[in-house]
Amino acid sequence: MASATTLTRALVQGSQRVSGSGFRQISTRSLLSRHQVPPKVILSSLRKFNSSAVKTAEGQRIPYKILELPAGHYLRSSIAVEDNVVKVADVTIPNIWLRDNCQCSSCVHQATKQRLLDTFSIPSNIAPETTEVDEGGIKITWNDGHESYYTRELLSNRQRTPMGRAKVRQGLTSIKLWDKDIAENPPVVLENNDSNTEDQVKIVLENIRTFGFCYIDNLSTEPEATEKFLERISFIRPTHYGGFYDFTADLASKDTAYTNIALEAHTDTTYFSDPAGLQAFHLLEHTDGEGGASLLVDGFKAAKDLLRLDPEAYHILSSVNVYSHASGNEGISIQPYRGFPVLQHDPATGYLLQVRWNSSDRSGIELPIQEVGKWYEAARKWDNLLKDPENEYWCQLTPGRLVIFDNWRVLHGRSAFTGKRRICGGYINRDDWISRYKMLHFGQEKVMKHLASD
Ligand SMILES: C[N+](C)(C)CCCC[C@H](N)C(=O)O
Ligand SMILES: O=C(O)CCC(=O)C(=O)O
C-alpha cells in the first residue's frame, strides 16, 4: 500500500481515479489510477498537505479537494430497535426525520414526489408505538397512529458519507482533468440524426460531465439545428442578450463579445447570482478575415495546480468574495445579490464546484481596501496558470462543429479577428443540465430513490 506521502505526491501529480463503475467515457485515454487506497488515507494526507480548508455548514473545516474520491460507500444497513429508538448500523435515526420522511401516499404525492405531510404537525414527542423489522426494512406504527415503512436502502442511503450522498444528488462522476494535450483526442460525438436521440444526448452530457466540454460534429449550419440540439438537453436560458443567440462583431449588445478584440480565458455571466451552466458556440461563418481562434482552459485542472503550488493563494481565491457586473446596455446593470469567490466549494464535501472568473467584468473585492493586495497576489498566480501555454487548448471552430461546455468549470476565450465572423449558441441553466444528465446517466428510479436520503 502506498504511504500517505507517496500517495499525496501521486495524487497531486495527477494520478487520477477514472471511474470504472459503468460510466461510459467516449474517446478518453483511460488512465488507471496508480493507487487504490481508502479515502481516509487520502484525506489524512491531504489534510497534512494543504494548509487551508473549506468551512462546512457545521463549522468544521475539511480540506479542499478537486479529484473525486471513490464515491461514498454504504454502511452496513443493519436495522435494530433499542429502547424504542431505531438504529441503522449502530447510528440512531431521529424519530422526527423518520416520520417526516414517510414515503406513503398520504405523506408524499406519488405523482409529483412532493411532501404532502405538514412537517410541523408532527408532535415533537413522536415515537414508535410498535416496530417490525423484516428483510426489506422496518415497519413503524407511530404514537400518532400513522403507519410507515422504510426500506433498508433509504435508511442506509442517509448514512452514507457526504460524498456518497452528493454523488446522485449532484450527478458526480470521476472527472478527467486536461491540458493543451486534449487537442490530440477531444471528446466528440457525431450528429448522425440518430433516431435514438436520448442516447446521443446521454453521451454528450457524459462527456461534458467528465471532460467539461464536448464537440458535436456534422451538425447542420442552419442556426435552427444548433437551437434544436441545445433544446434536446434542456430549455435555453433567456438573458439580457436574448435566448438563442446568433452574433457578430457589431456591438448589437454592449459587450466585448460583440467586438473583434481578443478575449482572455473567462467564464461567462459571473455577474448573475447563478452563472449559466452550459454555454455553446457554433461558428457559422468567418469571411474576409482571419484570427478568431477559440480558447478552452480546464479551470479545475488549473485549480488543482494552484492548490499544489500555493495552497494559501488557493484559500484566498476560495474564501474572498468578489462582485461582477454587466452594465453596457442602456438601463441595465446586472450584479449578483452577494459576492462569490473565484473558486467555490461544496461545504458538505469540500469539493470544488465552480470557477467564477472574468477579469473584465469584475467589480468589488470584499476586503478592506488596505488588504486587497493579497487577493491580487493570489489572483496573479491563478491568472498565470490560466495563461500557461501548457493549459491553453486553442482550437479553430468550423461550421458544422458545435462545442458545448460546462461554464462552471471550463473557461473560454478567443484571439482577435478581422472580417465577418458569426457564431450562434445558447446558455442552459446548471440545475437543468445536471438534472438531465442524472436522469439519463443514473435513471429515474435511482434518482427518485435518493430524494429523501441524500
Ligand atoms: C450571449 N453571448 C454569448 C453572445 C455573449 C455574452 C457575453 C458574455 C459576457 N462577456 C460574459 O463574460 O458573461
Ligand atoms: O467569440 C467567441 O469566440 C467567444 C465570445 C465569448 O467569449 C462570449 O461570448 O462569452
Image (spheres, rainbow, N blue to C red):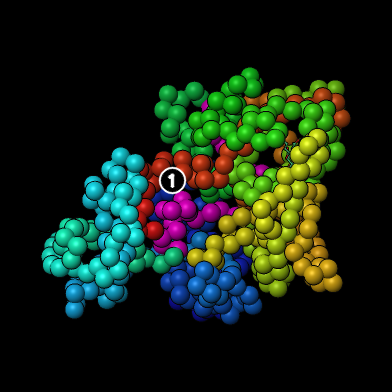
Is residue 206 in sight in this rendering?
no
Q: Residue furthest top?
A: 222
Q: Residue at x 78, y 58 (%)?
A: 364
Q: Residue at x 23, y 58 (%)?
A: 151
Q: In this view, does 401 lie to the left or right of 255?
A: left
Where does residue 219 sit, x and y in percent of width and height? 59, 25
Residues 4 and 368: in front is 368
Q: Residue at x 66, y 44 (%)?
A: 183
In magenta, the rendered stretch is 163-191
Is residue 72 in sight in this rendering?
yes
To which quarter of the image does residue 350 belong?
bottom right
Residue topped by disc 1: 438
Where does residue 136 sit, x and y in percent of width and height? 17, 58
Q: Is residue 272 left or right of residue 206?
A: right
Residues 347 and 72: in front is 347
Where does residue 255 sit, x and y in percent of width and height? 80, 38
